[in-house]
Amino acid sequence: MIKKLLLASAATALLTGAASAADLPRRAAPPPVFTPVPVFTWSGAYFGINAGYAFDASSNNTSSFAVPAPYGNGTTAYFGQNNQEGFSGGAQIGYNFQLTPGNGVVFGVEADAQYLDFGRNRNRSIVTGPLAAGYYVTDPRGLSSLDFFGTVRGRLGYAFDRVLVYGTGGFAYGSGSADRSFGGYAGNDSFRTGYAVGGGMEYALPVDSFLNFFRSSAVTLKVEGLYVNLDRNTRNQGALVINAANNFPVAYNPVGRRSDEFAVIRAGLNYKFGSY
């Protein structure tokens, strides 16, 4: 009898303890860890390459040169400036700063250097009248004397997350190879300066893009259009009569200032470094 009472008491105590334990407050589960999605920003330095097509944008498509005696007798040379077009390609480097990540104003600066394929029509002319044997005429002005150009421009735009729409403008320069322009004449001042304006659109690919060879914070693709106006100075920049035997000018026709205008449509690839 006593043994049964002891067992009953022990069972009651166990049940009471279990019930009390069930009534104790449970430990709250830890809150889930929230990882914010990074907001893209265009801020940072970048470099890249570009390629496109350049073409004449001037309104003056022809020029003429009266060949002096004894190299001509009532002879006139006409130089066409139409069909001055060709490949353009080069590289750029720059820096952007975005005021607010995500959507916001972006401003920056960019410099580029470009090759121009205008030289194939360098000596194209039509001559009316007799021209002395052993001589030819050429006009080093215009786009045909340009071998390269470059710009240093500001950029201002607005970003819609990974899409940037911008305008650009600033300093431009260009030059030709003297020995290709007209016989290496030391008086050639083929270097010219001016301005460039334009605009474009740029899109940032994901960081894990297969194009991200340099492990940059972003790879961006852009399409851009530029209008370039280069103004020559006044030193011996007119048409020339060249002695074919030694490829040296024997006469020239100085003219006043002339603007060389062309447009460039190009696509580019940039690698951005800095903030994501």
Image: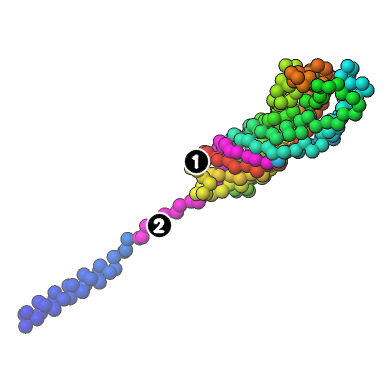
The one of 144 and 215 positioned closer to us in this rendering:
144
Q: Which mark is residue 31?
A: 2
Q: Is residue 129 left or right of residue 183?
A: right
The label nearer to you, 2 versus 1, is 1
Q: What's drawn in magenta, residue-wise?
A: 28-52
State the residue at coordinates (88%, 16%).
70
Q: Residue furthest bottom?
A: 1
Q: On the rendered structure, is 187 left or right of 217?
A: right
The amino acid pointed to by label 1 is Phe
| Residue depicted at x 60% and y 48% | 161
Residue 186 placed where, x, y %? 72, 16
Most foreground residue, 199 or 52: 52
- Indicate yes or no whether the magenta region holds residue 45: yes
Describe residue 9's horizontal placement relative to residue 26 as left or right. Answer: left
As displayed, is residue 188 above or below residue 271?
above
- Residue at the limit of the structure toward the left, as seen here: 2
Front-most of residues 138 and 189: 138
Residue placed under numbered mark 1 in the picture = 214
Question: Is 48 located above or below residue 190 in the figure?
Answer: below
Mark-to-mark CA distance, 2 and 1: 38 Å
The quarter of the picture where residue 52 lies is top right
Place of residue 90 in the rendered image (x, y in percent of width and height, measured from the top left)? 63, 35
Q: Any mark on residue 80, and which?
A: none
Please say whether residue 30 is one of the residues in the magenta stretch.
Answer: yes
In x, y percent, where is residue 222?
64, 44
Instruction: Name the element at disc 2.
Output: loop
Amino acid beneath label 2 = Pro
Question: Mainly helix, strand or loop, the magenta region?
Answer: loop
Location of residue 176 in the rendering, given as x and y in whole percent from the top left corner: 71, 26
